[in-house]
Image: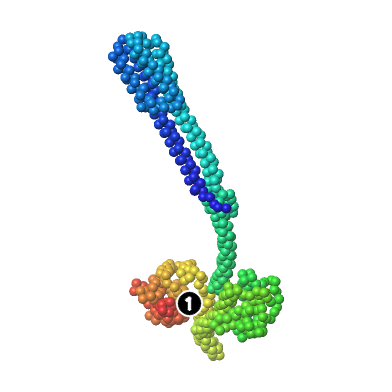
Amino acid sequence: MKSISLVNRINFALSTIVLLSISTMLVSYWLSDQADNDAYVINQAGSLRMYSYQYAAYAATQPEKADALKNKIDEVWHDPTLMAVSRHPRINDCYQQALVSWQALGLAIAERPYVDIITAPVFAEHIANLQHYVHSLQLSAEGKIQTLRTAQVIAFFITTLLAVVILHWVRIRVNRPLKELTQTAQQISIGNFQCNLSHPQRDEFGLLAETFNSMCRAISEMYDTLEQQVDDKTQALTHSNITLTFLYTLAKKISAHEAKTHDFTQVMRELSQIIGIDDIELCLVTTNGDIPYLQISGSDTHPECTRTHCHECLDTDSTNGACPEAQINFALQRENKRYGIIAVRPAASTTLQTWQQQLIRAVADQLAIALSLRGEEEQVRRITLMKERNVIARELHDSLAQALSYLKIQVSRLNKALATDNKPLIHDVADELKQGLDSAYRQLRELLTTFRLKIDGNGLLSALQKTVQQFTQESTMIIQLDYRLINIPLSPSEEIHLLQIVREACQNAIRHSQGQHLVIQLDQHDDGRVALSVEDDGIGVDEHPDRTHHYGMEIMRERSQQLQGELSVKRRNQGGTGIYAIFTPEYLRSK
């Protein structure tokens, strides 16, 4: 079926209205043109009656005026406009009758001049014919006006009817489809693509309706496809987020040294849930072992995994033939050290995807790092333990061992004195033994304090503040702490040595200085070296301080040497003693 353009229909309707309007105007113009001279003609015809009366009156009394008026009346009867209008069939007879009666009136007056003709029958007939002629002209003019009115009324009704028809047609064929298209467009704008437009005509709106329907179907299919893609991407992102969170948590625990062997069970369970494979197992072996000392399953549905010996499959090559064909191994290996494998046994109809292999490999590497760090921590603890034992042995050798050797010598002297009954020597040896035992006991207490000393997580400043608080409570001295190393990173070893030097210097000052004030200051020089000073206002140090308080001085010197620094003890000019230590921090030495 051939389509009819809606634009052509609208053009046709508008053209019809315009044509009707033009026709109405032309007809009205023609009718008004026909009646253009009617008023003039009626006026002229009415003047003939007046001229006739005047002519009849002048004929009896004033013949000269009567003749002049007769000529004028003849001119009116032969007026072109009057004759043109009088040619109409309905008017021509009246015109001819009136003209004939005028000629008869003229003959009657010519035959009997000076006679009162107004009362004559011929005059009355002429006046009647004129009246009939004027009436015919009036009827003709009124007929033209009535015809104009009728044409205008007919044009009005035709125009009104055509306008109503066109408006109804526009409402049915334009407004309604346009409204449906607008509503459909609004529905599409809010995401509703279920449109079903129907338009019976094959015009522009029909084409738009079909186009909208096709567009809705295409957009709906595209939207559904995009929604599915978005859902797939969302699921993939969610899965990636879960995977990254899992790896981040595992790496965080490992970097914080929080991952223990008993946490591996939870790790394997989470890994099994993420990759969607229940049959997964972690087998841990020693460095030189070939039989797992620990097997952890990733799911409760496969408890037999923990009872299955997988030592035949510990090779990193999953295709060596020793393992089941469906088993894939991921080695836990770091720095050429083997810690075990992660054995994955997917279903027969499935294969491991790339992301699953990458995730399992990442988990295997993280677990290998955790096991490696655990081994390194154990080795560090062994070395630390050995160092601590060496320190204890050295401290015991430098203090208690020498004190006990000295006491052993005094006991030998006492035995000799007892054998000879040398009472002065016995008393002298007894005093030496008492002083030696007191010194050994004091040294033992100092060693116990040293070995028990520790710095908590708050750092050196907190430990020094606690030390100052302790010594303030145990003595009458006013102790002041000036700490200026807030922005300097010190190693744990440096903090321990500094704290021990401060404690030893404070103990010496409290016991021997007899002062009232004690100032502890930690600062950094321009060259980066750290300077420690402990100053009191007491009696001052002896000329040979190394001989007095021998063990305390030696301990401070040894710790200063371990800091690779220098220690000096000086008498202050303003009175009192100053202990000064200076060293380069480890973070500067490592540059």
Q: Is residue 541 visible?
A: no
User: 173 left or right of 303?
Assistant: left
The residue drawn where x is 56% and y is 90% is 419
Q: Is residue 79 above or below residue 309?
A: above
Residue 382 at x, y percent in the picture: 56, 81
Q: Quadrant of residue 246?
A: bottom right
Q: Which residue is mark 1?
A: 493
The colouring scheme, among rainbow, by chain, secondary structure or one colour, is rainbow
Where residue 339 sits in the image (x, y, percent)? 60, 81
Q: Quadrant of the C terminus?
A: bottom left
Report x, y in % for residue 444. 53, 79
Q: Residue at x 57, y 67 (%)?
A: 236
The image shows residue 514, relative to residue 315, as above or below, that is above
Residue lying furthest front = 111
Is disc 1 placed on a helix, strand or loop? helix
Residue nearest the viewer, comparing 541 with 3? 3
The quarter of the displayed image where residue 487 is located: bottom left
Residue located farthest toward the left when viewing the structure as drawn: 64
**Residue 467 % position (x, y):** 48, 70
From this view, report whether residue 307 is shown above or below residue 177.
Answer: below
67 left or right of 143? Answer: left
Residue located at (49% from left, 48% from top): 7
Say if residue 574 shows up in the picture: yes
Out of 183 and 265, give the one closest to the viewer: 183
